[in-house]
Image (cartoon, rainbow, N blue to C red):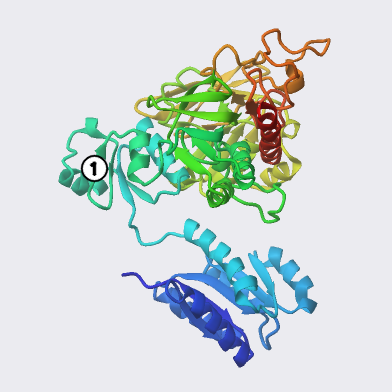
Amino acid sequence: MPARPVLLTVDDDRAVSRAVARDLRRHYGDRYRVVRAESGEDALAALRELTARGETTALLLADHRMPGMTGVEFLEQAMDLAPTAKRVLLTAYADTDAAIRAINDVDLDRYLLKPWDPPEEKLYPELDELLLAWSRTTRAPFDGLTVLGHQWSADTQELKEFLARNQVPYRHLQGEDGAAIRKAAELTDDATLPATVFPDGTVLSRPSLQAVAQKCGLATTAGSPFYDVVVVGAGPAGLGSAVYAASEGLRTLLVERTATGGQAGQSSRIENYLGFPNGVSGAELAQRARDQAVRFGVEVLTASEVTAITPNGDGRALSFADGSQVTAHAVVLATGVSWTRLPAEGADTFAGRGVYYGAAAHEAADCSGEEVYVVGAANSAGQAALHFAKFASRVVMLCRGTDIRASMSEYLVGRIEANSAIDVVTCTQVVAVEGTDHVERLVLANGATGQTHTVPASRLFVFIGAQPPTAWLGEAFARDERGFLRTGPALLDDEGRPPTDWPLSRAPYHLECSVPGVFVAGDVRAESVKRVASAVGEGAMAVTLVHRYLEAIG
C-alpha cells in the first residue's frame, strides 16, 4: 500500500506549530500524514528527505513571519522540491499585503489569517477545496482501468477523451506494453480493439461510451419519468441552469452526450473568468460546477443523447437514443456548439488519427518533443497553443487572416508573441492532409498568392469556428441561416408580432424559442455572446424565465 500523502506545516512558535498539526491530524489523519517543522530550514530538510524517499507532499502550510527564512521564502524554495503541492500562507492581518504579493511571486494557492479558530469554519473548508483539487491533478499509484488500442485509432481517441473528461483514471497501453493484458483478456485480434479492462477484470471489447459510463458508475438513464425542468447540454450554460434550477427547488435533470464542461471543459486554461485571478483549467471549472449541481440534487446523465422534444399537454416530452422518454414542465437547451470541420482534402479521413477538433489537456503529454500545428486565431486556439508549447518542441499557428489580434484577446496575443516555442503563420490555410494510417504531411496554401508547399506533421488541432448541433430538432424550432436557435425578440417580425404558429397570446420570453416552455442558453442561441461568463449568466436567466413560465401555466 502506498504511503499516505504528506501535509507539511512550519511555524517557529512551538505552541502554534503543535496546534496546527493537532488540527490537521484531527481532520485529515485518516488520509494524510502530518509532518511539522519549526523553521523554514528544518521544513526544507524534511521536504528534501520526503522527496528523496519518493513520498508525495500534498500541502505546504507555512507561517509568514519566521526568523531566518520567511514563509514566502520557504514556499518559493519548496516549489522545486514539491511542485504539485498546494501552497498556503498563514499570516496575521498586518501581513496581508505580503500574502497578496506572494500569490504571484510563489504561485500561492491561498492565504489564511490568524487565528484560524474554529478550524471547522476557517481552516478545514479552505484546505478541503485545495486538497480535492490536488487529488484530481496529481498522479497517484495506478488503480484505474486500462485502455487497449492503437494510438492512431479514432475510436481509441474518442474513448480516451471520454474517460479523461469524466475524470476516470485510466492508462493507455499498446504494442508490447499491452501484450500480456491482451493475451489474458483473449483480445488477440485487432478487430476487438479498442477495449477496456477494469480493475475487477471485466473486459469490454469495442464498447459504446454508454457501456463504459455505466461500468464506471456514471448514470446514463433517468431515474424518474417526470421533472420540473430538463437541461440538455452540460457546458457552462447548462451547468449554470442546473445549479440555479435545483437550488431554487426545481426537480432537475441534466443530460450530456459526453462529459460536463462543453468546449470550455477542454480549455487548458481560462484566465479571464471572474473570481479566478490565477486562471482555472476548463476541466476543473466544469468539475466544480458539476459537484455544485449534484450537491443541490441535480440528477446528471452522462453518455445520453436526447433525440427529440415534442409537446405533451402542458409538458414537454424528451426522447432518448436508447428509446426511453421523460417529460418535463420546461426544457433548457444548452447544447453549445461543435467545431467546424476543416475543409481540406483528407481531413475527414484522418479525423482522430492526427486531425483533432479542440484540444483536451490529456493530448498535450503525447506531443512531447513533437512539432504541433494549430489551425485558428481565436482565444481557444491561443490557449491551446500556449498549453501545447509546454510539451511540444514547436507549435505552429496557422491563421487565414493577417493578424491574430483581430479575433484574440490581447493578453493571449502578448503571451504567444513572447513564447519562443510558438510561431504564428498568417495568410495561410491547410488545403490537404496526407499520410498512410495517420497524418504525415500537410499541404499549406498562401491566401494572397495561392502558392502551396508541403510540411511534415503528425498532429493538427483545429479551432476554426462553431456549428450548432440543432439538426435533430424538428421544424417547429426556428433557426437562423446558420442553424442557431432564435429566441425572444429574434422571433418577432418587423411589427413586433410573434410567428403565425405561436400558440400563446403573449410574446415569447427573452430566451424562449419558438416552442413555448423550451428556453435556449449559451452558444447554441442565435446572437449570443460566445464567452463562458455570458453562458453561465444566460443559464441562470433561463431559470428565472422558467419560473415565470411555470407560474403562467399554473
Instruction: Quarter of the image for the N terminus: give it.
Output: bottom left
Residue 254 in the image: state x and y as whole percent.
52, 38
- Residue 492 placement: quadrant: top right
Please give left or right for residue 307 compared with residue 420 in the image: left
Please give left or right for residue 175 compared with residue 344 in the image: left
Residue 102 in the image: state x and y as whole percent.
71, 68
Residue at the image point whose x is 66% and y is 21% from the top: 513
Callout 1 amino acid: Val
Residue at the image point whose x is 73% and y is 45% from the top: 411
- Residue 313 placement: quadrant: top right
Pointer 1: residues within 10 angstroms few (<14), some, or many (20+)?
some
Residue 237 in the image: state x and y as whole percent.
63, 37
Viewer-closest of 296 and 184: 296
Residue 486 in the image: state x and y as whole percent.
68, 19
Viewer-closest of 477 and 107: 477
Viewer-closest of 40 and 94: 94
Residue 297 in the image: above or below residue 397: below
Q: Give the residue at mark 1.
A: 203
Secondary element type, mark 1: strand
State whether residue 104 appears in this view.
Answer: yes
Viewer-closest of 80 and 66: 66
